[in-house]
Amino acid sequence: MIEQDKFYETFKFEIDLFIKKSLEEDIGNGDYTTKSCLQSPEKRKMILKVNQPCILAGVELAKKIFSFYDSDIKIDINLTDGSSARIGEIGFIVSGKASSLLILERLVLNCMQRMSGIASLTNFLNKKICHTKCKILDTRKTTPGFRYPEKWAVLIGGGYNHRMGLFDTIIIKDNHIDFCGSITEALSRTKDYIKKNNLSIPVIVEVRNEQEIRQAMKFSWIDRILLDNMTKNQIIKSLKLIDRKYKTEASGNITLNNLVEIAETGVDYMSLGAITHSAKNIDLSLKAI
């Protein structure tokens, strides 16, 4: 699994493309407000102010955004990604052309407020189950176009990334199974496809009941069995049947009310779409000084 400090290095092309597209979306033909108000290349400073307790995230991305647009911008960091930030603390001081700082202000805040919300929620949930071996995974339930920063924020909050997209892991879900007719047929086709195309790719299969578990376990080469929408007792029963022969994951209908008891079953992973799609933005501001 990818480490937090390796995320940008691993996905540099995708994140740089995100920054480029985001700037094009926001600036268009030019920031006419800034052009009309600031007609000289004066240098100014801004501070990132924390207005709400949080796990701060997006500092490294902010650095990339500033340098991508204007390499002369300088940033002095007080709080790094993953810091527990308190109200009133200053995350960083950024200095450079006033026009550049004003143009980048909203993109930086949009990213950091969203990422800090995701990191804070992930950290909160992770602490709830830290006495177990279960790891919290994100999902593909992300904001279109913003997946990489959101998944980066999950790592900063202490969670783990599931597959990045449809291209890096095979996950055979309920609809795939129903279209194929059975898990046996779906996995047989998958094995043939992997062999024919000489692929080296993880395979996870979603199961809904004991019958499907038994079918999946006939294929020793799969990497993980995903227990879909099961209660605590159903998970416990399923884990006994699987008997640690495969890594296991719980998914579906996992809430704050049952998070701990599911983690305590002994399942290896639990995946929660809520840590990306339901996290609330954190109140941060960039202010001129």
Image (spheres, rainbow, N blue to C red):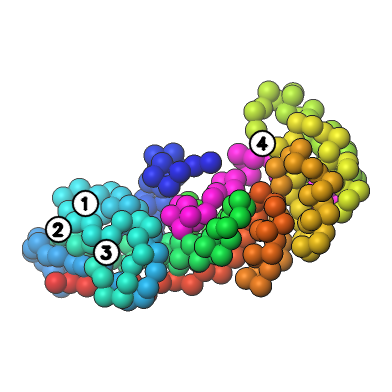
**Distance of label 4 from label 3 (alpha carbons):** 39 Å
Q: Is residue 41 located in the magenta-colored stretch of the structure?
A: no
Residue 70 marker: 1
N-term mark: 2 or 4: 2
Q: Earlier in the sequence, mark 1 or mark 2?
A: 1
In the rendered view, would you say 40 is above or below 190?
below
Q: Rounded to the nearest whole Å, what is the CA distance between mark 2 and mark 3?
A: 17 Å
Say if residue 167 shows up in the picture. Answer: yes
Residue denoted by label 2: 96
Instruction: Confirm or deny contact between disc 4 and disc 1 (CB under 8 A).
Output: no
Q: Quadrant of residue 6?
A: top left
Is residue 99 in view? no
Which mark is in front, 2 or 4? 4
Give percent across and percent down for residue 268. Answer: 66, 49
Using the numbered discs, state the Cα–Cα distance from disc 3 to disc 1 in whole angstroms.
20 Å
**Image coords of residue 69 (percent x, y):** 26, 52
Q: Residues within 10 Å of mark 4 (few under 14, many from 20)?
A: some
